[in-house]
Amino acid sequence: MLRLEGIHAGYGPTTILHDVSLEVKRGEVVTIVGANGAGKTTTLRTIAGLIQPTEGRIFFEDRDITSMPAHEVVDLGITLIPEGRQLFADMTVEENLLMGAYRREARSRQAETLEHVLSLFPRVRERLSQSAGSLSGGEQQMVAIARGMMARPSILMFDEPSLGLAPIIVQQVFEVIEAITSTGTTVLIVEQNVFNTLKASDRGYVLENGEIVLSDTSESLLTNDHVRQAYLGI
Amino acid sequence: METFLQVLVSGLMLGALFAIVSVGLTLIFGIVKVVNFAHGEFLMLGMYLVYLFTTKLGIHPLLTSVIVAPLLFVAGVVTQRFIIQPLMSARDDHIQIFATVGLSTALINLALLLFGADIANTPSSGLRTPITFGPVRVLLGQLVILAVSIMLVIGLQAFLKRTQTGRAIRAVAQNRAAAQLMGINVNRIYMLTFGIGAACVGLAASMVAPLYPTSPNIGTYFVLTAFVVVVLGGLGSLTGAFAGAMIIGLIDSFAGFYIGSDVREVVVFGVFLLILILKPSGLFSNRLSLSHVSP
């Protein structure tokens, strides 16, 4: 469904990703594991079209989307829930969710999607008329995930969904992610919480210094010595 | 007392005039984050268009808004697309400001070339008819400006709050990257916003031209006050700009009458400086939060 071939990308003169290739098949949940600064966020931002790769190709359903601008990538059904939530702080929660359904395919069914999404997030429903900036970090993360789902994406990308949240909230975030993946939605996720994320996913890639050094099923990665030492602290 | 009332009402009428000229400026600043120094020249162009449509085609000045506002919309879109957008990636934001200053000078000279330095008088077509409410006397055209400026602010607020496109405009202003992730074409939103801002001043031109003589420099006269109004109201706030315009109109009117007409501007800008020092974010909260930037 989504395929990266030999991607080099970065910011200005700084190259962060070196020859990154990875694939996500329809219905799969794929994790990218890596330390801070390894290039996980850069990978997702490159797929989303926020960064243009200097080399390599990105394909979505066999269509070349390498140099497509971000707003067109969204129109194809690729949605990124960015690191740090990035809500529209001075708009209401409801307005944030409606913005999530901006892409053409989602707009006509926005009322129906909103009802479905709110059934998953009862807390968000209570906050609909509040401004997004007034919510707690955990609530904001829920709104960010709900906003991403409003796009009815074919593939949903999570960038560090549990970053900076209290442990009890982290658990809720993972419950939500599991609820989403159990419906068969294709997911690509980047998380510092390696153990929980691998548990919830089918396959994983290990990214170190901008290069993929390992790729395997999540089960194997969880028992892999290198992964256990470097990321699980075992 | 009667004089006081007249000065008060004259101040409000003047405020409405400033408001209708300032709305587009604050919209563009709040969303595109560009201080458009050519805003006054857009007004000047609009006023010449009104002059041409009324004198050559005999259209009523108020009706010319149906043509002038869309023409100015196009001018705004073209300015954003071909002057501002290529400079958006420039390292220094000030380059965009210099570009609009350049555009302003170019437009003034274009007007000098096309129309000469002489004043062009648009027929008032009944808009200078005085209307009296007891002791107070206003011009019909001034009442039109007041009504239209109120409707414009209410209409724009409703557009920004209730429509998907309006919400997209606010989303872009608040968090540009997140807006892109929603599938919003940011460049298109900027063009649309610049177009709407210019169309607002085109609408203003149809109301202003019958009351004020048009000349190539007329824009400078209005826009200086418009900048004061926009800063006073809190940059990017529509209701703030409206309230700011009313305050400036009243100060101008009262200072002109009770202190002396030659010190009006001294008082207006004195108050302006005072407010900048005491409350630099402007007097009013940013209701629509157009200029808020999320971290």
Image: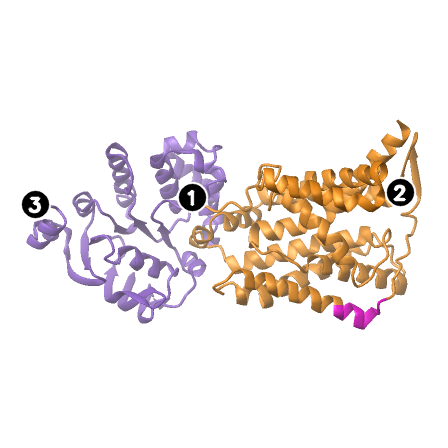
Chain colours: A purple, B orange
Is there one chain holding both mark 2 and mark 3? no
Is there one chain holding both mark 2 and mark 1? no
Residue type, numbered disc 2? Leu
Residue range of the region highlighted in magenta in the rendering: B109-117
Name the secondary structure under disc 2: strand
| Pointer 1 local density, CA inside 10 Å: few below 14, some 14–19, many at least 20 | many
Residue type, numbered disc 3? Ile
Residue B243 shows up from this direction: yes
Residue type, numbered disc 1? Leu
Name the secondary structure under disc 1: loop
* Residue nearest the observer in this picture, A78 or B129: B129
**Chain label for disc 2:** B
User: For the point 34% across and 58% down, which residue is it?
Assistant: A45
Q: On the picture, is B83 further left or further right than A91?
A: right
Q: On the picture, is B222 further left or further right than A93?
A: right
Report which residue position mark 1 lands on.
Answer: A87
Q: Main secondary structure of the magenta part?
A: helix
Q: On the picture, is B36 further left or further right than B180?
A: right
* Residue nearest the observer in this picture, B229 or B70: B229
Report which residue position mark 3 lands on.
Answer: A234
Is there one chain holding both mark 1 and mark 3? yes
Q: Residue A84 at x, y = what percent? A: 35, 45
Report which residue position mark 2 lands on.
Answer: B139
Q: The N terminus of chain B appears in which quarter of the rendering? A: top right
Q: Earlier in the sequence, mark 1 or mark 3?
A: 1
